Each structure stands twice: as structure tokens, then as C-alpha cells.
Image (cartoon, rainbow, N blue to C red):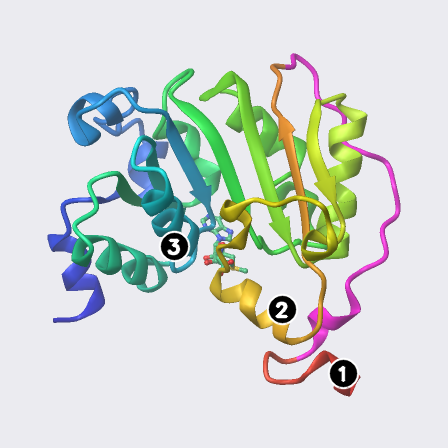
Amino acid sequence: MSKFADMETFPHVFQVPSHTLREGGLFEMKGKWNELFFKNSNPIVLELGCGKGEYTVGLGQLYPDKNFVGVDIKGARLWTGAKESIEKGMTNVAFLRTNIEMIHHFFAENEVSEIWLTFPDPQMKKVTKRLTATNFMKSYQQFLKPTGLIHLKTDSNFMFTYTCEMVKTNDYPVIYSTNDLYASDLQDTILGIKTYYEQQWLSRGLTIKYIKFQLEKRDDFIEPDIEIENDSYRSFGRNRNVADS
Ligand SMILES: C[S@@+](CC[C@H](N)C(=O)[O-])C[C@H]1O[C@@H](n2cnc3c(N)ncnc32)[C@H](O)[C@@H]1O
């Protein structure tokens, strides 16, 4: 069976075309993920841009008392985590195929406790596409609890610098921040989970950066006004080692 046919049969994979939502269609589980799907009242944690879903599945195994939803636009990638979680018999994991720009259509006010952003594309040219840009903070605060947390794990100095500045400019409380996670004093098994992209960046000798902050509610949002040097290695092909440059 093809991955896409497989996905249609998975009971824990959800998708609604963006045009349906734009035309006023509703996602019936919005506000009811726990009641209709997870059948408990445990906190809900999202991984946005989850790719193959390593964090969604890994966290789901570490925390059976939390519910995890992996979100990505690419179905073939989601399939890997969806298949693995089914095979492991996990009941606290689901996947959502959508553009993250539409994410507020899928979760209601205060429905989500935490968001993980794992190795998102830094979108160096287009700030509004960056998953830690203020337009996304405005979107996330619509469904994140007032004490809700955002975790960013990244190889990208550009993305990390931008996010730290965005957090500072908007005065969000920082819980933890390091520009070299594996040389830091943070001992946390959660951070030991390595995604597909993380393994690639580590094998190129890059350091991993991590910031955890609280998304307090804001009425106004300020985009940081700074120049950030681009990540030079991002223009290289996937197969070329950073050491070759
Ligand atoms: C660089 S990959 C990282 C994947 C995974 N988190 C990892 O670390 O291996 C970025 C992922 O985000 C997804 N993505 C980027 N922008 C998105 C958007 N606006 N909506 C949905 N998915 C998006 C891509 O499809 C891709 O799978």
C-alpha cells in the first residue's frame, strides 16, 4: 500500500485541506481533541514542522501522561511517525497534516500546553514564514495556555539569534537558553531525542542551540529590528560536508 493510502486508514492522522478552512469549513475536533480522540484530560503538546515525527513519538514514549500531536505539511514524512506510533500501540500520539499558517483552525483557546519547534527552516529571506516570527506568536497564543511554553531546537545561528531577539523585544520570560546544548549544563532526557535533521547537522559538526520561553499573552507584537548574518552553510547541497567549505 502507498504511504498516502496508508495515511487514509490511520485513525490518528487528521487532515483538512487549507482551502476548505479558508472557505469557512470547520475542523470538528477543534476544542475537543481530548474528549473525542485522546479520551482523557492530559495536557496537549504540539511539534510543529515535525517531519518524520521523532519528537512526537519520542516524547509520547517518555510521557504517557501527556498527549502529543505532530504537525507537518508533508504527508510522506508524517507517515514515518504515524506508522511507528501505530506499531508501538501508542494511544497518546496523533498527527495533523496542514500548513502551520492554518494551525489556529485546529485548536481552541487554552487547548495546548506546549509547542516544540524542531529544526525549522530559518526562512532567512522571509520573516513572516519563520515559525518564531511575531505573526506566529499571535497565532499560537490563540490556543496556547497563558503559561504555555515554546521550545526551539535548532542548528541555525540565524534562527536562534532571531528568536532570542524576538523573545527579548517582546519581553517573554526565558526559562532556559543555550547556544551549545551538548556543552551546556542542561541534563534533560527530552533533549536527547535526535531528529532526522538534527543528526545531519550534528554529523556536519554544527552545534545545537536551544531556547525555552513562556508565551505570555500580548496585545501588541514587536518585530525585532536587527541585521543577522546568514547561515553560510545553508547554500550547500545536502551531501556536501561543512568541513569541505
Ligand atoms: C527542516 S525540516 C525539520 C523536520 C524535523 N523537525 C526534523 O528535525 O527532522 C522542516 C519541516 O517543517 C515542515 N514545514 C515547514 N514549514 C511548514 C509549514 N508552514 N507548515 C507545515 N509544515 C511546515 C517541512 O515540511 C519539514 O518537514
Query: What amino acid is at disc 2?
Result: Trp
* Residue displayed at 73% across by 30% down: 167
Query: Secondary structure beneath disc 1?
Result: helix
The residue tagged with tag 3: helix, strand or loop? loop
Q: Quadrant of residue 29?
A: top left
Are dots 2 and 3 in contact, CB under 8 Å? Answer: no
Q: CB under 8 Å between callouts 1 and 3?
A: no
Q: Is mark 3 within 8 Å of ligand 1?
A: yes
Residue 201, label in figure: 2
Real-space Cα distance between discs 2 and 3? 17 Å
| Occupied quadrant, residue 91 | top left
Range of residues picked out in magenta: 218-236
Residue 11 placement, left or right of 102: left
Q: How far apart are the alpha carbons under marks 1 and 3?
A: 29 Å
* Residue 152, image x, y percentages: 61, 43
Dominant secondary structure, magenta: loop
Q: Of 8 and 45, which appears nearest the observer?
A: 45
Reading the image, the residue beneath label 3 is 53
Quick one: label 2, few (<14), some, or many (20+) residues within 10 Å? many
**Any magenta on residue 189?**
no
Q: State yes or no: Cβ of the residue under disc 2 lies below 8 Å from any atom of ligand 1.
A: no
Query: Are the residues flagged by discs 1 and 2 in contact, CB closer than 8 Å?
Result: no
The CA distance from mark 1 to mark 2 is 12 Å
Check disc 1 and report the residue beneath it. Answer: 243
Q: Nearer the viewer, residue 216 or 174?
A: 174
